[in-house]
Amino acid sequence: MTASALPTISSVNRAVVSCTRCPRLRAYCRRVAREKKRAFAGSTYWGKPVPGFGDPQARLLIVGLAPAAHGANRTGRMFTGDSSGDWLYDALHRYGFASQARSVSRDDGLTLADCYIAAAARCAPPGNKPGRVELERCRAYLAAEVRLLSRVRVVITLGRVAHDAWLKAAGWWERLAPRERPPFRHATASVLPDGTVVVASYHPSRQNTNTGKLTRAMWDDVFRAGREMLRGGS
């Protein structure tokens, strides 16, 4: 399957949900959905690959790593139902991209304006670490979204894996020499030859937020910069 074989965002989402290309990840997601976390014992888990979410006319694209086992793998919507989502939607709401500051389920009424959320991998991986081949198999979905989200002007990448995945999906990894590629340094904004701005950010995982590697002020800096760039017409 190639990115060009998916002509609309809806067709990308359908292809994502029905994907079976990574047996290890599919088996893991099904097992998590069956065994569940005690706190969600009464929930019906999504347990399938998770599609992107947001405004097809978005100028801001957020690229994460992968669904969390008991977050999006449970709820069926990116960054929904876990602590990383709490950080993300709070910031998106504060800067006018989300209709509410908290997301708990895919039918909770939250909508995004001028923002779309995607990921490097669409299945929850064991240990939050998708394999290299698994990322390559999933890349066509992100590449299709990059092509179809034609109004995107600012991209925020959450973590180095997501950063590199977007550069590869968008074609910049091959087009730019290694020294010319946007570096992954928190809150660093890089302008690409076509005018797109990519802003690198640490991922709001518990490992980063609980240890202080990523603070609220650092996180706020990233989204304030994204909003100001769009307001300025970048």
Image (spheres, rainbow, N blue to C red):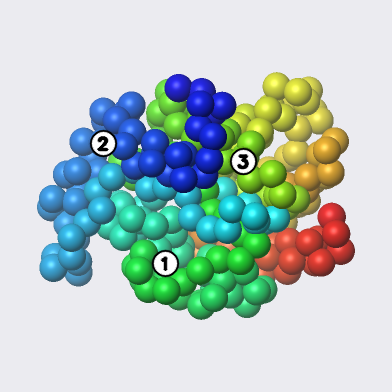
Residue, disc 3: 148
Circles 1, 3 touching at the beta carbon (< 8 Å): no
Residue located at (52% from left, 48% from top)? 118
Residue located at (45% from left, 39% from top)? 11
Query: Depth check: 117 or 156 in front?
Result: 117
Q: Quadrant of residue 131?
A: top left
Q: Quadrant of residue 98?
A: bottom right
Q: Secondary structure at mark 2?
A: helix
Residue, disc 2: 26
Task: Point out which mark residue 83 bears.
Answer: 1
Under mark 2, the amino acid is Arg
- Residue 222 in view in this figure: yes
Q: Earlier in the sequence, mark 1 or mark 3?
A: 1
Under mark 1, the amino acid is Ser
Q: Is residue 37 left or right of residue 178?
A: left
Looking at the rendered image, the disc whose residue lies closer to the viewer, 2 or 1, is 2
Residue located at (53% from left, 58% from top)? 54
Q: Is residue 25 left or right of residue 177?
A: left
Q: Secondary structure at mark 1?
A: helix
Query: Depth check: 26 or 127 in front?
Result: 26
Place of residue 7 in the rendered image (x, y in percent of width and height, measured from the top left): 54, 34
Place of residue 9 in the rendered image (x, y in percent of width and height, measured from the top left): 52, 44
Query: Depth check: 30 or 87 in front?
Result: 30
State whether residue 141 is above or below residue 118.
above
Spatial CA distance of label 2 from label 1 is: 23 Å
State whether residue 183 is above or below residue 186.
above
Spatial CA distance of label 1 from label 3 is: 29 Å
Circles 2, 3 touching at the beta carbon (< 8 Å): no
Under mark 3, the amino acid is Leu
Spatial CA distance of label 2 from label 3 is: 26 Å
